[in-house]
Image: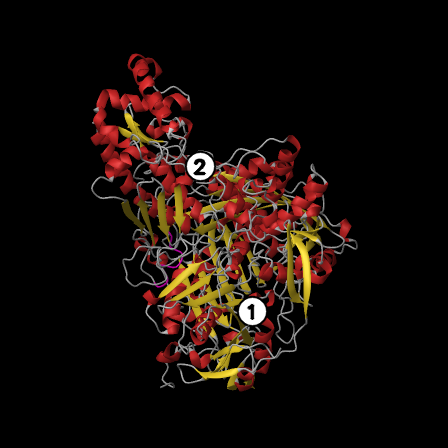
Amino acid sequence: MSDIDDSEGVLHESLEHSLENVEADIYVDSEDVVGDIEKEKITTDVVKESEIVGYRQQPGKLPFSKPGSGGKNRFSKPTDYSRIPRSQGGSLEQPWGAHRHDDLISGQVIGKSTSLVDSNWKVTGQAKYGDDIRLPGEVIGRILRSPHHYARVLSIDISKALDLPGVLGIATGDDAPGKFGVLPVTKDEHAMAVEKVRHVGDLVACVAAIDEPTAREACRLIEVEYEVLDSIHDIKQGLEDSENPIHDRGKYHIGESNVQKRVFQQFGNISEMKDSSVASHDSDWTFTGVNHGFTEPHAVVAHWDPSGRLTLYTPQQVPHYLHRALADVLDIPMHQINVYRTFVGGGFGGKSDPFPHEMCAAILARKTGRPVRINFDREEVFWVNRGRHPSKISMSLHADSEGRLCGIETDALIDGGAFASFGHVTTYYNGVLHTAPYEIGAFHYTGARVWTNKPASGAMRGHGAVNSRCAVETGIDDLAEQLGVDPIDFRLANLLPPHSATITGFRVTSIGMRECLERVKEESGWDEKFRKMPLGKGIGIGCGFFISGSGLPIHWDPNKFPHATVHLKIDMDGGVTVHTGAADIGQGSDTVVAQSVAEVLGLPLDMIRVRSRESDTSPVDLGSYSSRVTFMNANAAISAAMEIRNELLEATSEITGSNIEGLVIGDRRIFNKRDPAVGVSYLEALHKAQEDRGALVSSGSYRTPPMGRAHKGAAAGLAPAYSFSAYVAEVDVDIETGQTKVEKVWAAHDCGKALNPLAVEGQIIGSCHMGMGQVLSEEMKYGRTGHLLNPDFLDYKIPTVHEMPEVTPIIVESNDPEGPFGAKEAGEGPLLPILPAVVNAVYDAIGVRVSELPITPDRLYKAIEKRCRSEGVKEPLDLEPPRLELTALQEILQSRAINHSRRDKERRLTDSPSPYHNGALFGLDPEIPGDEQDSRWAAVVIPPDDYLEDPGLAGSAWKHTERRHRSDVE
Amino acid sequence: MKEQNTQVVDCSGKYVVQYSLPMVPGPDKVRWNATVNGVNVDFFIDSNAILLDVLRDQGGSLGTKRGCDMGTCGCCSVMINGTPKLSCLVLAQEARSSSITTVEGLSSGHYLHPIQQTFAECGGSQCGFCTPGFLVVSAALLERNPSPTKAEIKTAIEGNLCRCTGYQQIVESISKASEILVSGKGIDDSTSSKSDPHPGFSGGLS
């Protein structure tokens, strides 16, 4: 009680003091004084004392937190004006202009390096991942997997296994014949084999037993009779007609082949552009498959509670899509299922499908009436896979005499493995995601994804864009060399401006590509190093472009459903409960949502508690994929917080008599902009707003604006914003062994606005690590009989700390007009440039252009030997490193880059810039889309007959006719 | 020991076997004791049990993670008598009567070990799954060598895989923790505008 007396004493004493000194002391820079003065100012000037009685301690009651703080610290911190944007009277520079969220900045947390809100759970070992969920009475689930690549399942005899003591239940494909898949158009997976198994490791049956040895033994006792079918492992073979296609798509089946998806896209007249070119690059790339390599193997716990509802605990990136799939497969309504997302031990796209083992756990739990836990070993993770597609990509690039990129021709054949997964989208992304950041004269893309009898490929960080981006950027390096210009200057002279449209009609809003290139050029000392280093040392550049959220949700029902929704609830304790379905997979989405709410309401981060785990309590969110979470969820969180903010402002206005327009929010305090001493504490305003209604609740959501064109496939690659990045890598190649070591990387990424720079830097460096793995060491190796040779971390080589270069992350902030506080994505885009940067640096070091990844020593040494032979050099050490002699074009490009730089700065600062469509650089009117001016620029999405006479590899998929268009099929 | 299994008809009309002991020729149970995070424990374990399983399933240390089961990822690292070991490659019986420290044993009460503070503050932990292993290994390093060089830090963590951070922020976290240990000064809490600083949870040593 003495505490209370004291505080009231202080209040009265300083009240008198303040009456005399209000003018002099207003808003002094000391925490201790400010709180008191604020308090007094209100009581003396504006509000009658009786009105604040409610906030005083009532005699005889337990101590209740002091006004404003929500804790023992009652004092508000003065606003830090260096964090308030210029447009709001602060001193934070805004070189990219003002933003629509500027007036919401309270200087609390946005832009500050912030540790993840759940980091203390992780560092104390208390974070619960999939296998850490232990429910009373649990039993262990185990999966029987196919030993054959491709076989018909003739019979399954479970009787012996069932007789094994300790076995509580066994399920097979008959228990759940329903199909599912992450994309509604390609549902082709079953919980367990129905009719056929399609790859080694495909699920056949599952067992629940009292412990793991028993479950394993039971799996051994299950007798399965197979009829082995001819399997397909070569990606090219998938293009041909087959007696037993791996899946049957009914009337939509493409020929009798294993082509799952094919794409044809043509914009602009490629042959004319080719004729006008003076330099061309052609390459045929082979990319092997890579796996996400997250450290946490898949694990799941299923529990049917006594009221008959299913709770499924699983580390998932897309709990909502799983929710839908579970309802389909288990044949129960969605509201009977609670999907509980545990901590996720790394996802990177590898946990973004509904998985068969999740269905198995639920089925077994229903059978046995007990909680079932299934935990994978590392080998099983490789059987599930969903890693990056192995692919064969032919890339042709053309440049004209003015140094413009007048044509891109891409042919991508990608190996989907046994299931569709995200394949539909991947097939588009391999093409459409390299139509920017450059202005191009014509674009021609053919893509095909085929089924083979391997574990399914799927979405992996940089989904669909990584391999073809590598081919494009190394091609540009070659073009620049042929033209005798610096590759960075070549890029700078060919960039799209802000607020423009790409050749495929994507809407580019903010673009910080130019700044990224300029920063890495400067910081790496490019001009002193490029083509000037001794043999074996090299430097290379690569760029990237990636979506920040996908324009359309995967499920289109109901059509106008938001992509992200956030609910807020604030009760009288002042803490804010945030309900969001955003899946935090370690990237820090909980933190970003908490930051956004904290910023808008002017609260310290620990007053925000994020509840994002359970579908029972979280509003629907589409999940963590397509780099959508920060953009969409933070936007939804901001709009939810704005509702509360308005209520707080109204309450403050009522208490203080100030106009709402004149009020601003600072740290736990709402005050008059002109006279900061007039204001109330957060808690006072809150309690006023809660009068007669109790807790404040609000809901905010985000949906993408209408965008894009109308041609088939126009929606693939559409995003509300795009991120850009440019990396420079410096490598050291041991010429005699072919061993490549990346020494340094300068990594510039345009993330719009770094809401949490610590996390953005972490994403950039982490992306470098993952991309480095793909370019130098990681590879899913299949042997001659089609078996995966390295399903473990001994042989699947993830870079260790010794392989990591020194990465200098450079954050470029282009302040996206629609992003939350200007932010865009930073999770996937930063991976793209590291591959081509390393490949180009290897060329700079030894003059060898590789076209197969990873660049292992044996592959590179073979390429070095080949160069030696072709040049008649005996010793690799006598090779000459490539050198650059600049031509007259260099100056033309430089001056064009300067003009464009000026143009871009003007465009980004004007409120309503005039339209700019790709093609202006080639003489078209920038204000009208190319296809409306000239029929040759129209989108063509069905291959013309003359193309089919001599198609590319993937293009040959178009030789097949869909069954529904064929007369020989019923 | 072997119990007769009973068959019961379940709701779908199929026979299922109800709850009984496994018939699989199993290992013997042996008595096992050790000090886990300062507490003496005494269990009956399978004679062939792996230490990781004993710690997770019986020792209550779910913070010790299973990533690969074959000593390649380092997630399961624990200290056995002060030396970091991969618990998935240690037979529990080998560690009998030893003193084992897992990630849960690094802090003292609510007071975090400096290495835990810096992993949170410097971005050393993203998804957090590999974090327990890294923490144990680096805590062991700092105990031996409170001010390691960058090369020494890298050597200490070379057996641990992290797929999120690219190691750079992990190395920074360890350097920072070493600074704290050497200087005795705490670090700034990056979420510092806390309404009410958590006593002991951040900032300042125990």
Q: Where B58 falls versus B153 (above or below)?
A: below
| Color theme of the render | secondary structure
Amino acid at the residue labelled 2: Gly
Query: Residue under mark 1: which chain is it in?
Result: A
Q: Quadrant of the N terminus of chain A?
A: top left
Residue most toward the right? A874
Q: Nearer the viewer, residue A182 or A401?
A: A182
Residue A492 as seen in the image, left or right of residue A931: right
Estimate how packed mark 2 is, as few (under 14), some (14 to 19) or many (20 or more) residues with alpha carbons within 10 Å: some
Sequence-first disc among 1 and 2: 2
In the rendered structure, find residue A111 and report the number of the disc placed on it. 2
Alpha-carbon span between mark 1 and mark 2? 41 Å
Helix, strand or loop at mark 2 = loop
Is residue A341 magenta-colored? no
Range covered by the magenta-colored residues = A712-719
Can see residue B116?
Answer: yes
Q: Nearer the viewer, residue A427 or A330?
A: A330
Instruction: From the image, tell me which residue sits under label 1.
Output: A383
Question: At 68% across and 61% down in the image, what residue appears?
Answer: B32
Q: Residue A825 at x, y = what percent?
A: 44, 47
Q: Where A52 falls versus A536 (above or below)?
A: above
Q: Nearer the viewer, residue A805 or A332?
A: A332
Amino acid at the residue labelled 1: Trp
Q: Residue A55 at x, y = what percent?
A: 28, 31
Q: Residue A398 at x, y = what percent?
A: 50, 54
